[in-house]
Amino acid sequence: MVKRIGGALLLSLDLDRESTRSISTQLCTALREVILSGGLSAGERLPASRTLAKDLGVSRTTVNDAFERLVAEGLIESRVGAGTFVSQALKAERPMPSPRVQETPAPARKPRLATAVTRAMGDFVERQRLPYSPGAFVTALPALDTFPMAQWSRLVSKHWRAQRDDVMGYGEPYGYRPLRQAIAGHLRTSRGVVCEADQIFITGGAQQAFNLIGSVLLNPGDKAWFENPGAIGACNGLVACGADLVPVPIDGEGIRVDVGLELAPQFRLAFVTPSHHQPLGVIMSLERRFALLQAAERAKAWIIEDDYDGEFCFGRRPLPTLKSVDSTGRVIYVGTFSKSLFPSLRLGYLLSPPALVSTFERLTRAFLPGVPTSLQAVTAEFIEEGHFATHIRRMRRIYAERHQALCDAAGERLTGLLDVAPTESGLHTVGFLPPGISEIDVAATAEGRGITVSPIRRFSLKPTGISGLVLGFGSIRPAEIRAGVGVLGQVLEDLMR
């Protein structure tokens, strides 16, 4: 057991054994430079003389001699029974060096980037990062206050007591086998998807899955249908892979397949969120799902189904996933634990059609390092012991209550100001603004009063004609929802004046 810290690592000290200067003098000079340059801060512990001598391959007498000189200079101090430390006197403000007269530097030369990256940099949808702490009405954040931390902590502790090779070694590039099996079983029973564990590939969140799929399937300039408005992260991931995104509008049944065929009949890829559209909350109708599958089959295209929060359907029995009705093998299903468990897991997965399994195996084995095994192992056991199913059932009830609280409060306070649309799934819904009120102004004013609302325009590749706000309700309790609605109502009234 380590009883105390061993002091800073000083392996970069340059000692020239061919120099005419003694090693002790060189060591003293090198330590002085490190201390005065701020490499070692005031009060920081130096290694013991025996330790430093061993690290540098010199005698202990040499180290003691250097330490004694620095003590005499007041740069370090020795404490009986504790060790040697950088002097506290160095906390005082030091005089700045005199500025040197320098020639005007030449303009910095821009780095040469790959053609695909240069193009993508101009197409990325750049938006200010939204808050990721609970509050009204932050989106994409689950109810962290209700997560079963006791069960999770027990499994974490259990796993870290396992064999060190399993805990600390390199993981499988495709993913931890028990987790792949657990996900396949969950998809069969909960989402109606017939699949095998070999089709599951574990990724560092859904974003990595999108990047991997785009890298496998897209050449620069390939046409890709994309919901408009749509998910920003997936948009940027596909753009980075060279996709030429084709914004396809959304109506009450989901993506307009007829418009997509008019804009790009020979598309290579389509990205959709059929279980709960991001951000409008629309559930894609069964007829529209079949139309999309037929269009993809005719064009020999692939479909990414992003089921980011489809677990939380509380309004009715959920429609089958697009993957579950895909008889052509064109759908690549992507899931994530960021909403069903918690975001910092950075744990997602893709379900590959049989025709692409060997391709994903070769690429992940060659290029991806794999997700930390410890996170996967704990998640697998969380599912296998039944905690995941229990958690999902409980969260459906909680999100239904929070959604109802939002709708009730909006009905009482926001009538004529914001038309909040009920949803049947997920962690957010939308509210539509009356003519004459700018969603950008509402968002900016609301932010100044401590609440977060996202303009629908934020998710749009091109103007949609829809003016509204995305309202997250998953991360806050009903009382906070009602208070947030009160603030939002005041914001809207002030702007209408």
Image: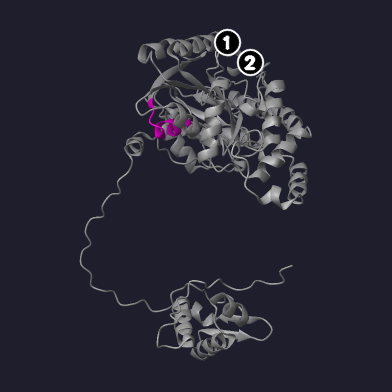
Residue pointed to by mark 2:
320
> Is residue 376 at all visible to an observer of this figure?
yes
In the image, residue 440 sits, relative to residue 260, either above or below, namely below
Say whether marks 1 and 2 touch (CB < 8 Å): yes
Q: Residue placed at 53% from the left, 88% from the top?
A: 71
Image location (x, y in percent) of residue 410? 58, 26
Q: Nearer the viewer, residue 30 or 272?
A: 30
Rendered view: 198 above or below 299: below
In this rendering, the answer to whether 165 lies above or below 9 is above
Distance from label 1 to label 2 (Cα)? 8 Å
User: How many marks overall?
Assistant: 2
As for residue 389 lying within the magenta part, the answer is no
Q: Earlier in the sequence, mark 1 or mark 2?
A: 1
Using a 10 Å C-alpha cutoff, classify the residue at mark 2 as few (fewer than 14 neighbours), some (14 to 19) or many (20 or more): some
Vertical order, 124 against 333 (above or below): below
Percent position of residue 125, x then y: 40, 34
Give the magenta range: 234-244
The type of residue carrying mark 2 is: Pro
Residue positioned 58% across, 41% down in the render: 370
Residue 239 belongs to the span the image colors magenta: yes
The prevailing secondary structure element of the residues shown in magenta is helix
Q: Percent position (x, y) of residue 294?
A: 49, 9
Tell me the quadrant of the picture where the N terminus can be found. bottom right
Q: Which mark is residue 93?
A: none
Question: Which residue is depicted at the point 38% across and 79% down?
Answer: 95
| Residue occupied by mark 1 | 286
